[in-house]
């Protein structure tokens, strides 16, 4: 089994679960025992500051939305670029943390790039592999820019990237225009 940790899962049109319609999931953990990821393109209407003040007695300087990480209940978690407070390194300059101490430090870090999540996407051992085999998910390598992107069309961007990579691997084309109808 090849681990998908640090990669993206992109919901395919075959995936019928409404929790994952056009979802882009960043994989935090993937092993034979199971997998866990965070949905990158589901900002909530709740601000991080609001949620933070409900669980902590310290002020929160972050003015950004809290993200729905997925349908599974989970403690507050962060993907960030603050290396001294990381628990898992996922990509160069992209880390995962969930401990209270790490989250306190990350939220207070003045130049941190961070995204906080409530909930996660989780799979039991073998479940994700079965879904991949059914064609429910596409996979892709990623970068810090994509992980921290706030683009409303992240799913469309990543799905297009995966489709072009698949096409290039089959047909030796040097260039595909953004709009092939202009040919």
Image: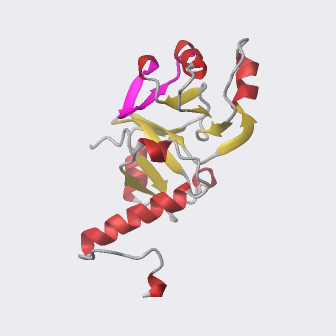
**Magenta highlight on residue 98:** yes
> Taking 133 as reference, is 63 above or below it?
above
Q: Total of numbered circles in the picture?
A: 0
> Taking 141 as reference, is 70 above or below it?
above
**Magenta highlight on residue 30:** no
Q: Give the image location of residue 144, x and y in percent.
A: 43, 41
**Residue found at x 74% / y 36%:** 46
Q: Give the image location of residue 7, x and y in percent.
A: 38, 45
Quadrant location of the C terminus in the rendered image: bottom left
**Residue found at x 67% / y 36%:** 64
Nearest to the observer: residue 99 or residue 15: 99
The colour style of the image is secondary structure
Q: Work out which residue is located at the far front of the displayed protein and give it.
A: 111
Quadrant location of the N terminus in the rendered image: top left
Nearest to the observer: residue 28 or residue 172: 172
Q: Give the image location of residue 177, x and y in percent.
A: 41, 76
Query: Which quadrant would residue 75 be assigned to in this image?
Result: top right
- Stretch of the chain drawn in magenta: 85-100
**Left or right of residue 167: residue 84:** right
**Residue found at x 59% / y 28%:** 74
**Residue found at x 55% / y 21%:** 106
> Taking 13 as reference, is 86 above or below it?
above
């Amino acid at each position: 089994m090849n681990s998908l940790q640090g990669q993206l899962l992109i919901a395919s049109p075959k995936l019928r679960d409404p929790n994952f319609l056009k979802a882009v999931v960043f994989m935090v953990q993937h092993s034979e025992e199971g997998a866990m990821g965070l949905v990158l393109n589901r900002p909530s209407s709740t601000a991080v500051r609001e949620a933070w003040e409900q669980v902590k007695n310290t002020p929160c300087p972050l003015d950004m939305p809290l993200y729905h990480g997925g349908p599974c209940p989970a403690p507050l978690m962060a993907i960030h670029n603050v290396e001294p407070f990381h628990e898992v390194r996922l990509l160069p300059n992209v880390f995962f943390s969930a401990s209270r101490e790490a989250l306190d430090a990350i939220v207070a870090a003045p130049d941190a790039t961070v995204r906080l999540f409530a909930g996660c996407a989780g799979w039991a051992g073998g479940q994700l592999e079965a879904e991949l085999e059914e064609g429910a998910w596409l996979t892709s390598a990623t970068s810090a820019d994509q992980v921290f992107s706030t683009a409303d069309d992240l799913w469309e961007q990543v799905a297009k990237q995966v489709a072009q990579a698949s096409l290039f691997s089959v047909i030796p084309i040097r260039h595909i225009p953004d709009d092939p109808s202009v040919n």
